[in-house]
Amino acid sequence: MTKNKELQVRKDKVIAKGQKNLYPIYIEKASNSELWDVEGKRYIDFGAGIAVVNTGHNHPKVNEAMHQQIESFTHTCFMINPYESGVKLAEKLSDLAPINDAKSVFLSTGAEAVENAIKISKAYTKRTGIISFNGGFHGRTNMCLGLTGKIAPYKRGFGPFPINIFHIPFPIEYYGITIEDSLNALKNLFASTIDPQDIAAMIIEPVQGEGGFNIAPIAFLKELRKICTEHGIVLICDEIQTGFARTGTVFATEKYNIEPDLITVAKGLAGGFPLSAVIGKSEIMDASGSLGGTFGGSPIGCSAALAVIETIQEEKLCEKANKIGEIVSNRLYKLKNKYPETIGNIRQLGAMIAVEFVKEGDALKPNASLVKSILKEAIKKGLIMLSCGINGNAIRVLTPLTIPEDQLNEGLDIFEEIINNLLKS
């Protein structure tokens, strides 16, 4: 029995089935955009831990910052004895976020950030209703699952979820869902189900993550900002997957020329260390009497995050994200031209890229089985890729933003070879 198989057997005996792993590949070491498993096999990483290691695996600046902090102290609880790195990080986020007069609260996970954004919104507005979107993903806690607009594999068997959560369609031109369709659904919701004066917050991903990398149209987010302002609704932009240079700007929201009331961040914030935050307008943030958590704002995480921000700026990772997006999308469009009946749609914002697979060129005929076959072949050939989408028929490209161009093209060569082999067979 191989070492990977042995570890999988051991894992299956002691880890709940619900925490399953996509690949039975156990990693021993990593560097930038490369991983090596316990058997010494090399992999090119097109997943980045789901957009977490934007600065690459084991970035020396990030590692050094964490090591220095570990030598000083590892925990005091930010709510008891705070530390300068936490204050400095909050100052940096206030400067970077597209929100005037911003404050932050630090937590540990993306789901905690979303939960607290909802709490803050309710405390500020004294209202209870929340609006989210079909296809959105906001985390795995009970409230976050209620907000999430995708059943499998997240919500099945875990209900009931909190009341007063309402979903409306996310505009996706490829599926025939227009901006007008979404806005009309919102108007109907206000007219038939809940008064806008009872809505505390509206939460939206500028680019849907698990939902398939659907990009919110600029006109749509601008109209949502107008509606939220009109009715006193808190607009929350969930930037947990889109943040920290992934889309070619530090925050995807910057591209929309709007000011959200709150932004949730996690994933790429601390380069692999668990750290999240809610960033928001001071008036809204200060309306809540008690926020936080034992591990929220870990000194190690804050130190790592400061190094991540410095790396983004020093290595021009926003520009690199746009270059990665250009290279990948050009390669994908060539494949689409070659296989127009199978490759249905390509969506790209910076280095957040997805390619959708269909049958007979029909957007309403998802080809999830082909995606599963592609992922199966990719891991055999040393390429780590992830699927996404409501129907599981899209593959996302989420490389570290530090990936060398030759490794990026090496991974794309493997992907292209797999597509050609599967579609010619």
Image (cartoon, helix red, strand yellow):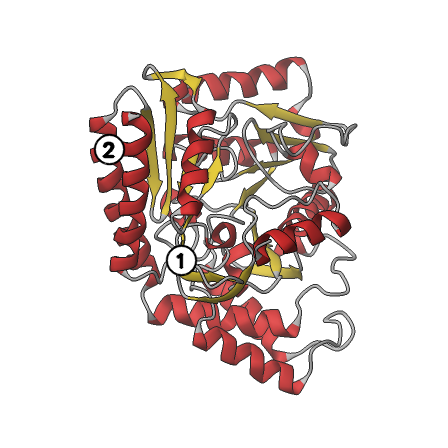
Residue 13, visible in the rendered structure: yes
Find out whether the residues at labels 1 and 2 contact each other: C-beta distance under 8 Å.
no
Q: Amino acid at mark 1?
A: Pro
Number of marks drawn? 2
**Circle 1 is placed at which residue position?**
400
The residue closer to the viewer here, 96 or 283, is 96
Residue 214, visible in the rendered structure: no
Mark 1, secondary structure of its residue: loop
Q: CA distance from mark 1 to mark 2?
A: 23 Å
The percent coordinates of residue 9 (x first, y second) are: 68, 50
**Circle 2 is placed at which residue position?**
335
The quadrant holding residue 355 is: top left
The percent coordinates of residue 2 (x first, y second) are: 57, 55
The percent coordinates of residue 114 (x first, y second) are: 65, 46
User: In front: mark 1 or mark 2?
Assistant: 2
Q: Is residue 266 left or right of residue 370?
A: right
The quadrant holding residue 196 is: top right
Q: Which mark sits nearer the N-terminus, 1 or 2? A: 2
